[in-house]
Image (cartoon, rainbow, N blue to C red):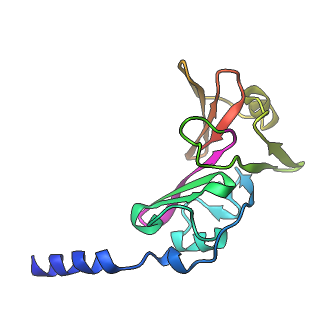
Amino acid sequence: IIEYKAMSIFNIFTKDPTEIWSKSSKQKLILDLSNFSINNLKIGTEKKELHKLGKPSNKKPYKNELFEYRESGLIIETENDKLAYFGIIIANDQFSKEFEEAQLSIVLSATGFLSIDNETSRKGLIRELNLEVNNTDRDEDEIIDFININQYTIEIESFNNERIKRIN
């Protein structure tokens, strides 16, 4: 019990490693679905590698395992010190007002890049990427398409007007 209390007190005073990272700035994001990476940071990468994106906007990202890059429209979550999730804000809604809209390009295997913005339609994106939707959820606020690629599930969230708001 004494050892546990000492560790807890030590953790309170431990600085978050991101405090010494360089300040982040707005970045263009490149999503590669062939290796599930954002700006060359793959799912499963050690979270310390996030220094390449710069210091996150939120407080205590290491402790909370949540790294917000608001100026770039990017959210990254980690589990067990490894990248586990990323969310890309394409268009703001009531839950993402603090974020800038992302400047996103998706890698197309042989033909280059597909630029995505707040005017991109969900059907157009799915068609351009030649994806098969496994399931779609609809409610009064949004449409979410679930697409399985290998062991991952991609979620394309859209407004009811079919314009994309977020890719997870």
Please report the residue visible at 74 percent of the width from the left and 61 percent of the height from the top.
Answer: 27
Q: Which residues are magenta?
A: 79-91
From the viewer's perspective, tell me whether residue 33 is left or right of residue 153. right
| Residue sitting at the far top | 140
Please report the residue visible at 64 percent of the width from the left and 42 percent of the height from the top.
Answer: 167
Magenta span contains residue 64: no
Task: Give the x, y percent position of residue 33.
Answer: 70, 50
Task: Give the x, y percent position of residue 85.
Answer: 54, 52
Total count of labels: 0
Q: Quarter holding the C terminus?
A: top right
From the viewer's perspective, tell me whether residue 103 is left or right of residue 82. right
Instruction: Tell me where residue 6 sits by quadrant.
Output: bottom left
Above or below residue 131? Residue 84 is: below
Above or below residue 86? Residue 140 is: above
Asked whether 33 or 54 is in front, the reply is 54
Above or below residue 165? Residue 65 is: below
From the viewer's perspective, tell me whether residue 132 is left or right of residue 94. right
Q: Quarter holding the N terminus?
A: bottom left
| Residue sitting at the far front | 98
Magenta stretch, main secondary structure, is strand
Task: Give the x, y percent position of residue 36.
Answer: 65, 54
Asked whether 70 or 43 is in front, the reply is 70
Magenta span contains residue 87: yes
Task: Give the x, y percent position of residue 32.
Answer: 72, 53
Asked whether 152 or 80 is in front, the reply is 80
| Residue sitting at the far left | 1
